[in-house]
Image: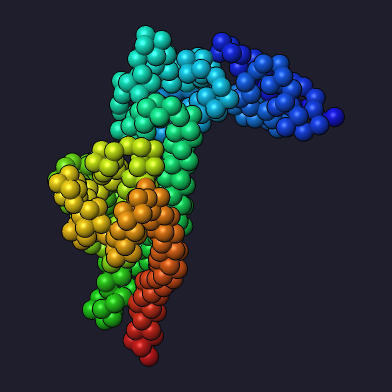
């Protein structure tokens, strides 16, 4: 009979772990519940051994640094499971403290446990750690406390964070190959100019003005790379560092964000990506009972682009004065007709939240398709550009060789 490694919590929050034999994982879960335990994890024994070895090997690296988004996702997932299984909030926090191997997470959870034991609401305990838990997260928890469905709200938070993480990872993964291709193209050109072209310098040394103009240009570039390559490299790194510093300043960030929205293909994809975050956040908040005005304000803050955020913020005043959401969306000139019509239908049926989630799904799909199309266009353009540049270097050298033959004849 298969063996399973398990971890569970007692009613008072104490952790327990061990191994048991059962026909399958469901049977192992039943055995734990029969013992009065709240299962946290049940794994196949072989897989558990591998996971433990991996955890121990990465513990030193994972146990350092501040609390990050992955830590928040992990503790939200685990707390949701424990609350859904009937464990009290303070007991669940104790279990999370015992399970955590990261000092910053352990310290944060300890402060939250002290606040909850002192009579504070969980949302208030989260608000004390505002840089880690944003307004969206805190308001979702507050709505769960008001409705008595905290475990369900945490589960929806997990789904929301997983979707946003998947969307970001898809965008990053999609941009990885073009970035590598661009790096290879630049490195190939530098290699040609710095190491290959100078090899022909002695051959063309005494020809002077008899060399064709393309050959002279390429030889000058090669000589420059060979003589001043290190200086050029340091200057490029320094300029890149200064540009990155400036781009993080308010003026630089504003300039870059406005420029990004005006780019031919990427601008439209960026707009849809930001609107996906907005629509999913707004739909999730409304679906959990957060008032419309508060949800609009919080969802607006989730948008990273300052220009779009300012445009979306203009929706709040008309809605506060009693206007319809679809009409306010139309006034921003940010949303496409499909989005406005979906929200109009949602207002008429009293289902704005589900319609915003549907809009987020549609926009997410359009972003993924748009990225694939852009990459389909970008990859051959980069390859063609690299080929043309290298071909120009080779042709210029061949022209120089042919001019030597003509002089010899």
**Residue 92, position as x, y percentages in the image:** 51, 18
Q: Residue furthest right?
A: 1
The quadrant the N terminus occupies is top right
**Residue 233, position as x, y percentages in the image:** 30, 50
- Examine the image and state in which quarter residue 403 appears: bottom left
Q: Residue furthest top?
A: 118
The answer to whether one can see residue 242 in this image is no
**Residue 390, position as x, y percentages in the image:** 40, 71
- Residue 261 vs 317, above or below: the answer is below
- Residue 281 vs 259, above or below: the answer is above
Taking depth in this image into account, of 370 and 103 the one nearest to the observer is 370
Q: Residue at x 36, y 75 (%)?
A: 392
The answer to whether one can see residue 201 in this image is yes
Q: Residue at x 32, y 48 (%)?
A: 278
- Examine the image and state in which quarter residue 3 appears: top right
The quadrant the C terminus occupies is bottom left
Taking depth in this image into account, of 300 and 296 the one nearest to the observer is 296
Taking depth in this image into account, of 80 and 109 the one nearest to the observer is 80
């Amino acid at each position: 009979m298969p063996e399973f490694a398990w971890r569970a919590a007692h009613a008072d929050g104490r952790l327990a772990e061990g191994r048991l034999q059962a026909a399958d994982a469901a049977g192992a879960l039943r055995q734990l519940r029969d013992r009065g335990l709240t299962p946290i994890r049940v794994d196949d024994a072989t897989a558990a051994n591998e996971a433990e070895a991996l955890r121990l090997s990465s513990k030193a690296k994972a146990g350092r640094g501040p609390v990050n988004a992955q830590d928040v996702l992990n503790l939200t997932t685990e707390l949701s499971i424990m609350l859904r299984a009937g464990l009290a909030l303070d007991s669940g926090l104790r279990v999370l403290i015992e399970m955590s191997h990261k000092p910053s997470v352990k310290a944060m959870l300890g402060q939250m446990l002290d606040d909850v034991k002192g009579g504070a609401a969980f949302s208030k305990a989260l608000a004390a750690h505002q840089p880690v838990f944003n307004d969206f997260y805190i308001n979702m928890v507050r709505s769960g406390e008001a409705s008595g469905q905290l475990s369900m709200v945490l589960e929806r938070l997990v789904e929301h964070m997983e979707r946003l993480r998947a969307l970001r990872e898809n965008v990053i993964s999609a941009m990885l190959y073009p970035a590598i291709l661009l790096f290879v193209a630049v490195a190939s050109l530098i290699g040609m100019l710095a190491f290959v072209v100078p090899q022909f310098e002695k051959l063309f040394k005494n020809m002077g003005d008899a060399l064709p103009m393309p050959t002279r240009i390429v030889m000058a570039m090669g000589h420059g790379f060979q003589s001043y390559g290190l200086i050029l490299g340091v200057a490029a790194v320094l300029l890149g560092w200064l540009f990155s510093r400036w781009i993080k300043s308010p003026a630089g960030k504003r300039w870059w964000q406005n420029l990004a929205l005006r780019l031919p293909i990427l601008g439209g994809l960026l707009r849809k990506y930001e609107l996906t975050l907005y629509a999913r956040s707004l739909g999730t908040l409304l679906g959990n009972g957060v008032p419309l005005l508060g949800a609009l304000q919080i969802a607006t803050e989730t948008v990273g682009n300052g220009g779009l955020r300012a445009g979306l913020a203009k929706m709040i005043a008309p809605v506060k004065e009693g206007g319809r959401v679809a009409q306010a969306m139309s006034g921003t000139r940010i949303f496409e007709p499909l989005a406005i019509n979906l929200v109009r239908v949602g207002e008429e049926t009293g289902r704005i939240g589900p319609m915003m989630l549907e809009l987020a799904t549609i926009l997410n799909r359009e972003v993924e398709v748009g990225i694939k199309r852009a990459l389909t266009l970008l990859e051959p353009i980069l390859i063609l550009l690299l080929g043309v540049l290298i071909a120009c270097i080779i042709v210029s050298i061949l022209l120089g060789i042919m001019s030597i033959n003509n002089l010899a004849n």
